[in-house]
Image (cartoon, coloured by chain):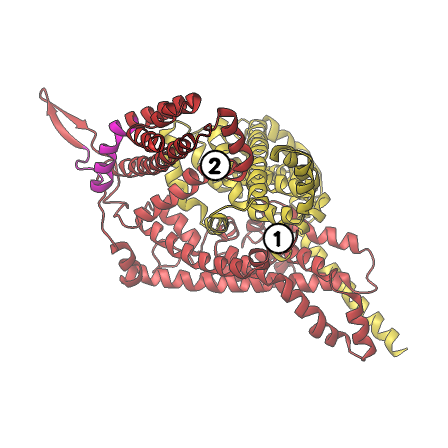
Chain colours: A yellow, B red
Amino acid sequence: MGIKLKNTIRLTFSYLLLVIIAIGCIYPAAWVVLSSFRPGKSLYSKTFIPEAFTLSHYQELFTSNTFMFTTWYANTLKIAVLSMVIGTLLVLLTSYSVSRFRFKGRKNALSTILVLGMFPGFMSMIAIYILLNSLNLLNTHMALIIVYAAGAPLGGTLIMKGFLDTIPRSLDEAAKIDGATNFQIFRKIILPLSKPMITYMGLTLFVGPWVDFIFARLVLRTKENWTLAVGLWDLVNSQQNSNFTLFAAASVLIALPITILFVFLQRLLVDGMTAGASKG
Amino acid sequence: MRQHRMIAAILSAVCMGLGQLYNRQWMKGIILTVIGAGSLYFFFNNLGDALWGITTLGEQGNRFEKVDGLTKLVPGDHSINLLIEGLIVLILLALYLIAYYANIKNAYNAGKQRDLGEKPNTMKDTLNYIFEVKFAQSFLTLPAFGILFFTVMPIIFMVMLAFTNYSAPNNLPPAKLVDWVGFETFTSLVALKSWSHTFYGVLTWTLIWAVLATVTTYFGGMLVALLIQQKGIRFKGMWRVILIIPYAIPQLISLLVMRNLFNGQFGPINQYFKYFGLNGLPWLTDPFWAKVTVIVVNMWVGIPVSMLLIMSVLTTIPKDLYEAAEVDGASGYQKFRIITLPMILFSTAPVLITQFAGNINNFNAIFLLTNGNPVVGDYQYAGATDLLVTWLYKLTLDQQRYNMASAVGIIIFLIIASFSIYNYRRSRSFREEDMIQ
């Protein structure tokens, strides 16, 4: 009886705590989603659930002349997809090289990657800006793609290498005896076996450009070339309280695809996070 | 019979590719000759200017000159462009010298093969050598170039800036020139009252923030993970998905939303306070409460990450440990303290240090939520919640105090780099990476 009662109390208390935390987690998201359906423009609302629902803010996103939602969505998609593809490829090649081959200076290269990855990004922004300027790439999407993709190996190599290290090397050696070239081993053994990690890497390399605004704001000068993040940032900074519901609607449309992807792929997130650290 | 190697090496030293041609490696020889000639032409045209630019940083600023009785603005030297162009030329020169050395060595080796009566490598052999034997080095070249020009070069550039007086309002090209000033920027940062006061203030808050942000999210995540993994809790999957939501929403969105949520006048949080007859709090406008808000919001964003991490560790703890403890009559708390906690700490210690380093650099959390505000009166361009990294951003983009920003950046870098190198060197993946075969 004593143990049973204790257990019940413990569980009730735990459920209570979980419910409170869950509300805390969902509330801001729910608030934005609900605000996006609320008539009017203001941040202030009397009730949590709006008294009336409207889709006009979503409509406005697609018709507005100042908030060029569709153009920006297309820009962002293009930049994010291309940087993801090129970046993932670069990460795979670098991590395959450092995981499978032993060469002079390898450990130093790994330490260098680690240290450089820690450098505050926009410290280098001015130099990159001048470089892009002299290459005539300012205000182009190409510039963003190059810079995002070139930066990918810095952030991803160690994690990806940690994963590749766990793929038994006897597999490669067997293939090598059968006469496979390094490229064939990479394509036929490494790629299929590291699918989960590639998905994780692709996801993170997609999300980065999808939401980055600091660098995008610096490079993209004209409004037609902006990305969603730059546009949204501008919306908040120029008219924070005056058109909150439009901001909410835009937020929902930007966050929704990413959020759904993440929730579906949550298992991968754990693998990705631990691969860099405990597993090695 | 020893001449071939010497002749080939000397020819290659005279001009890239000649030695290879002498060795009858036609394709390789032609390619190298073209590269060599092109590089020579480039350096002939640029090296002098580059050295002049990087040492003097320009000699004349913009000036007005009388031309045919009319006063005209004549553009002068742009110090910063000179600096970065000089830097690029020097990097290219270093690459060229490496290639030159490799070219001589290659010609020498091929000549040696001929001396020994062997045939030097054909183009096919060379390609095989590049793509099979030296696969790793060859495929690291492309990313290495990317990193060299988009990461290393900018870093060198910024380090150089810290030793100049490049800042608004007096030394801003193209109107004015920039000069080398040595360690002056660093001395004013730590010794000049107006700057050092801000620097130490911001540094202290950065460290406090990094510790609090790391500790709160870590133990918050542990609490939630333990709550969900308890025996008897149902719908574990559902709880996990709900608690993961804050992590899944892009920070750009969630932090901008939080900024509205905590709005002192219209934000719903203060509305609820009013509903209960309370006054509400100056969440983002009072220095103390702004700091509290930042930490709280960061918990909201960061706890899911720790939760996922700790959950995955929990599943790896062997069950028989707990069973043995139960046989010995251990209480729930004792089991946690003796088994669970040490196991979690052991496997997540490296992540903890990484998160600490990441928090020192946590630009988004501060910039998007408070933008470093509220402003502190006697600070130089910094607010109460500014981290070193957001202060750096303000110094750069808003104030154009580039030299000061670079000095701050170097300091951040030193702090973070020492943490991460220490962490990496002692991690298992570095020491025992060949354990898994």
Disc 1 marks a residue whose amino acid type is: Pro
Q: Is residue B61 magenta?
A: yes
Q: Mark 2 falls within which chain?
A: B
- On residue A224, the disc is none
Give residue B273's quadrant in the image: bottom right
Q: Earlier in the sequence, mark 2 or mark 1?
A: 2
Residue ranking furthest to the top: B68
Query: From which residue to which does the magenta span run?
Result: B42-62
Count all numbered tags in the image, as a single digit. 2
Residue ranking furthest to the right: A1
Per the image, the residue denoted by label 2 is: B141
Classify residue B285 as left or right of residue B336.
left
Give the Cα separation between the discs numbered 2 and 1.
54 Å
Classify residue A14 as left or right of residue B5.
right
Disc 2 marks a residue whose amino acid type is: Thr
Per the image, the residue denoted by label 1 is: B268
Q: Main secondary structure of the magenta part?
A: helix
Q: Are marks 2 and 1 on the same chain?
A: yes
Q: Could you tell me if the residues under marks 2 and 1 are in contact, i.e. CB atoms within 8 Å?
A: no
Q: Is residue B317 magenta?
A: no
Q: Residues within 10 Å of mark 1 (few under 14, many from 20)?
A: many
Picture layout, residue B215 above or below residue B324? above
Q: Position of residue A220 (x, y in %)?
A: 45, 32
- Judge by depth and name the residue closer to the eye, B86 or B248: B86
Q: Position of residue B352 (x, y in %)?
A: 57, 61
- Judge by depth and name the residue closer to the eye, B208 or B329: B329
x 56%, y 40%: residue: A91
- Which quadrant, please, contains the N terminus of chain B? top left
